[in-house]
Amino acid sequence: MSDGSDGAGGVGSGGGTGSTGNDSAADSLGNAAEALGNAAESLGQAIGNALGSMADAAGLDGALGQVADALGIDARDLQGILGAAVLGAVTGGLAGAVMGVVNGLVGGSLSEAARGAVADNLPAAIQPFANFAIDRFAGGIPGANGSLQGALGSLAAGALTNGRTPDIGDLGAVARSLGEVTTAARGFMDAATRGDFANATEAVASLEGALQGGFGQARDIAAGVTSAFAAGHDVYPGGGHGGFGNAVEQLAVDATRLLSQR
């Protein structure tokens, strides 16, 4: 699994397979599972501790699978928004988990918008190349390949709030701000795929530039929100980022408020 953002990465995949490493991993996993049963323990801290000591012994994919087993989660779910939060928590605790969630939701919104724009605006002969570029983009951002509705379902189920069902107002705020991000992303990607392109290379370059540019802006904005949260400050939207950026900032604020319900 590749690292697509500042907030969703940082775990190295080592090759150690000795018994000492595996024993240490098992002990860490057991400790993490026990910690997760304690409401006072941070999800980000518990998962971060488990993954930090297990990654070298089992590799990142193996570590995620073992954490999923300990938490009673289908390992496949770690490929979605929950996985994005787990990876973000490794280096950033709860604030990192928030960053991972926001990156995944924004990456998914951009990818979804790009697919629609490609279908609407590009000639059929160019579309396979453009969709391959979208797949490659989304594949580099944990959580971006999942369904946006599925991501909201995971949040609603309390998967990232220690099993506690989030307040309906906070969940609704995330859903609304995600809708605004998706709407803004559609306009953003529509503009990037309209034009008289000489060939597939030009069309794909325009598409990739818009995807990377949009995600880069979103990542920086979300990092500002989560950094304030990590420093113990209240988070609120400051604006001044343009339509898409302002929508991302609101999503980051709403996601922070939701995931901080512990």
Image: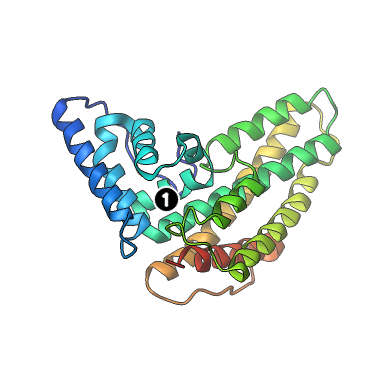
Quick one: quadrant of the C terminus? bottom left
Could you say whether the residue bearing mark 1 is in a helix, strand or loop? Answer: helix
Q: Residue 12 in the image: x percent, y percent?
A: 32, 37
Q: How is the image coloured?
A: rainbow
Seen at 65% across and 65% down, the residue is 172
173 w.r.t. 32: above or below: below
Question: Which quadrant of the figure has residue 205?
Answer: top right
Say which residue label 1 marks. 88
Could you tell me residue 8's position as x and y percent? 44, 47
Residue extending farthest to the top is 125
Outermost residue on the bottom side: it is 234
Quick one: 238 or 30, which is closer to the camera? 30
Label 1 neighbour load within 10 Å: few <14, some 14-19, many 20+: many
Q: Position of residue 11 (x, y in %)?
A: 34, 41
**Relative image position of residue 148 (x, y in whole percent):** 65, 47
- Which residue is depicted at the point 38% across and 74% down? 232
In the rendered structure, the answer to whether residue 104 lies left or right of residue 73 reads: right
Q: Give the answer, above or below, for where 87 lies relative to 132.
A: below
* Between 153 and 193, the one nearer to me in the picture: 153
Quarter occupied by the N terminus: top left
Q: Is residue 250 above or below residue 74?
A: below
The residue drawn where x is 54% and y is 54% is: 157
Point 27% across, 51% down: residue: 34
Q: Is residue 159 above or below residue 195?
A: below
Instruction: Residue 72: tell me if it is visible.
Output: yes
Amino acid marked by disc 1: Gly
Where on the picture, by quarter, is residue 120?
Answer: top right
Q: Confirm whether residue 215 shows in the render.
A: no
